[in-house]
Image (tube, coloured by chain):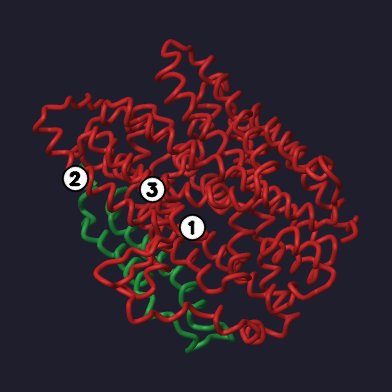
Chain colours: A green, B red
């Protein structure tokens, strides 16, 4: 994000947070198991489902932080 | 199966309603449809919410909604790669695509190929990008029809010979007509209705079906152990589970390079609409994950053993699973709603894909190479005709070519489209690559990817790389993308030393932010 000073007030380092979902998803060994299950759903399934929302949350967080002081 | 009249009537009523909507959409945020960016991008006037519906309806296609649970039903846990896939799509979109939106808006680009043409000043590199987009999209359009075919068969409508294809032909004529008249406004308007129907259907399914089957623990208890989790790695595996995560990562990098995704992005009214949608679109990923689980519910409900579905299963192996589950679990009227959601869900991406292919043909092949002096009106008219031809081609494809070939071509399409990443995505940040080096990288990776696809039996997207006695099953899109980069990196300094001409860059640094 080049541009005027106000845009740079949110640090670009926040973008590094976006690596987290990739690490979590590529590390398949950490979640290819049935236990602990939740409401009858094996770990493999509910864990990846939860990551959809964590991934969305991380993006939202970065979006807010890099645009802080922008308006 | 006998015809379910109640379901059929509900289905036809909903289908008729969206047909009217498709034609009325021409008046929505009225623009001059004799201009290509008005017909093909709806003038770029869609805000965050419409873009959310449009991209949701565009990317999470009817075929996806049939094929992912069908793969869960048939192959088990591996099909759940669709979930990490969608987790890994959006951070990438969030970082990259606002830049593409900005530079495209500033310079009037309507396709990725337009951007490459402007950035590298190379019409041949731009041609490679345009051809790849069209080739990768065609089988994808054809597969949308499979969704319509399956639900029509599920309603019990059948015929002999050409009559059996009649409902499909009618659906497609309707689609072609409203796309022709309304352009991108039609699928955008329909997407809102379609997505609402899909959400209702899926939420009802994930509540009602588990209740009828005795809860999620009963459902998962009915799944054979081999399907429940990924097979553990063997002693010769280089990186565990590489087949699973490379499929997810490669698909994630490829998705937004597809022309129909690009069309959705470029029709947004602001850069912020793209950033916000990167955070909001995962709601559809959640929907997709729930739909994937329907495949297991179908397995637990025993639709493969039920005698009333024997013919249906024979005609549409695996793909029959979820429609059959709905028939078994829901009253007729709701079956009509659910099936209409799937059929309408096929029209939205099919319309956007045909518009995107038409934009590519018209802007980057017709105007660039055939008729450079065409007027804006001629350009727009050409795109309208091409959208018809593309859809007719898809129809012929699905009626006359056996389904496994269509599926193979769509899988191959993912391997092809990702090869545009070095030119398009890296081009947004740097012009270091020599355009000729990018052309060679594209050519070699595309050839290698196609060869690797057909080198495995049966043909498929995962090719096991053998490295010093270890095996590394890897999604071919990802391994050939690495090859593509390697070729471009090696050749760039060579072409520069040889003094091969670089084109003019018409974009400026400030166009990207």
Tell me: residue B447, above or below residue B473.
Answer: above
Give the farthest residue toward the left.
B497
Sequence-first tag of 2 and 3: 3
Can residue B269 be seen at all in this image of the molecule?
no
Snapshot quadrant of residue B335? bottom right
Are discs 2 and 1 both within one chain?
A: yes
Q: Residues within 10 Å of mark 1 (few under 14, many from 20)?
A: some
> Considering only vertical position in the picture, is B230 above or below B264?
below
Is disc 1 in the same subunit as disc 3? yes
Of all chains, the one bearing label 1 is B
Which residue is labeled 3 in the image? B418
Q: Mark 2 sits on what residue? A: B489
| Placement of the C terminus of chain B among the 4 image quadrants | top left
In the image shown, does A13 or B503 lie closer to the viewer? B503
Number of marks present in the image shown: 3
Name the residue: 60% across, 35% down.
B185
- Please say if the residues under marks 1 and 3 sit with CB atoms less than 8 Å apart: no
SS under mark 3: helix
Residue B281 in the figure: left or right of residue B208: left
Label 2 or label 1, whichever lies nearer to me, is 1
Q: Chain of mark 3?
A: B
Q: Of marks 1 and 3, which one's residue comes earlier in the chain?
A: 3
Q: Nearer the viewer, residue B434 or B210?
A: B434
Q: Position of residue B87 (x, y in %)?
A: 43, 63
Query: Is disc 2 surrounded by few (<14), some (14 to 19) or many (20+) residues within 10 Å?
Result: some
The residue that disc 1 covers is B460
Quadrant location of the N terminus of chain B in the rendered image: bottom right
Q: Residue at x 50, y 72 (%)?
A: A49
């Amino acid at each position: 994000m080049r541009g005027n000073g106000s845009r740079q007030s949110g640090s670009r380092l926040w973008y590094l947070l976006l690596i987290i979902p990739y690490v979590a998803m590529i590390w398949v060994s950490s979640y290819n198991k049935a236990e602990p299950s939740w409401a009858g759903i094996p770990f493999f399934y509910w864990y990846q489902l939860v990551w959809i929302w964590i991934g969305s949350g991380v993006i939202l967080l970065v979006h807010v932080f890099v645009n802080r002081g922008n308006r | 199966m006998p015809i379910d009249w109640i379901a059929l009537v509900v289905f036809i009523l909903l289908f008729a309603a969206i047909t009217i909507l498709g034609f009325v959409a021409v008046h929505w945020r009225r623009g001059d449809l004799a201009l290509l960016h008005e017909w093909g991008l709806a003038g770029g006037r869609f805000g965050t919410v419409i873009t959310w519906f449009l991209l949701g309806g565009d990317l999470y296609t009817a075929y996806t909604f049939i094929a992912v649970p069908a793969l869960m039903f048939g192959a088990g846990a591996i099909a759940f790669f669709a979930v990490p896939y969608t987790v890994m799509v959006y951070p990438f979109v969030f970082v990259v695509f606002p830049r593409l939106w900005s530079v495209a808006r500033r310079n009037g680009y309507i396709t990725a190929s337009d951007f490459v043409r402007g950035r590298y000043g190379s019409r041949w590199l731009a041609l490679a990008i345009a051809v790849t987009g069209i080739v990768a999209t065609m089988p994808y359009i054809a597969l949308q029809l499979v969704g319509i075919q399956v639900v029509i068969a599920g309603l019990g409508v059948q015929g002999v010979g050409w009559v059996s294809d009649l409902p499909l032909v009618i659906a497609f004529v309707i689609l072609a007509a409203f796309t022709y008249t309304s352009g991108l406004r039609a699928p955008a308007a329909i997407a809102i209705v379609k997505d609402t129907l899909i959400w209702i259907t899926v939420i009802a399914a994930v509540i009602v079906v588990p209740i009828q089957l005795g809860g999620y623990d009963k459902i998962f208890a009915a799944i054979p152990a081999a399907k429940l989790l990924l097979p553990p790695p063997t002693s010769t595996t280089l990186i565990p589970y590489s087949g699973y995560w490379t499929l997810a990562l490669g698909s994630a990098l490829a998705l937004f390079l597809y022309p129909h995704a690009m069309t959705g992005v470029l029709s947004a009214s602001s850069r912020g609409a793209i950033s916000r949608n990167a955070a909001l679109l995962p709601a559809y990923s959640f929907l997709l994950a729930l739909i994937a689980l329907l495949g297991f519910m179908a397995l637990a409900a025993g639709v493969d053993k039920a005698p009333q579905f024997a013919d249906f299963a024979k005609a549409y192996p695996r793909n029959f699973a979820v429609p059959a589950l709905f028939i078994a679990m829901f009253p007729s009227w709701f079956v009509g709603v659910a099936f209409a959601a799937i059929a309408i869900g096929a029209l939205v991406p099919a319309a956007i894909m045909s518009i995107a292919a038409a934009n590519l043909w018209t802007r980057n092949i017709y105007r660039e190479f055939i008729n450079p002096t065409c007027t804006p009106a001629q350009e727009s008219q050409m795109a309208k005709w091409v959208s018809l031809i593309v859809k007719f081609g898809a129809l012929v494809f699905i009626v006359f070519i056996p389904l496994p070939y269509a599926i193979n071509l769509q899988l191959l399409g993912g391997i092809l489209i990702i090869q545009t990443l070095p030119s398009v995505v890296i081009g947004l940040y740097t012009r270091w690559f020599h355009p000729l080096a990018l052309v060679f990288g594209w050519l070699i990776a595309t050839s290698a990817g196609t060869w690797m696809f057909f080198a495995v039996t049966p043909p498929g997207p995962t090719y096991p790389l053998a490295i010093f006695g270890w095996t590394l099953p890897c999604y071919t899109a990802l391994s050939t993308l690495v090859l593509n980069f390697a070729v471009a990196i090696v050749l760039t300094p060579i072409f520069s030393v040889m003094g091969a001409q670089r084109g003019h860059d018409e974009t400026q640094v400030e166009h990207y932010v």
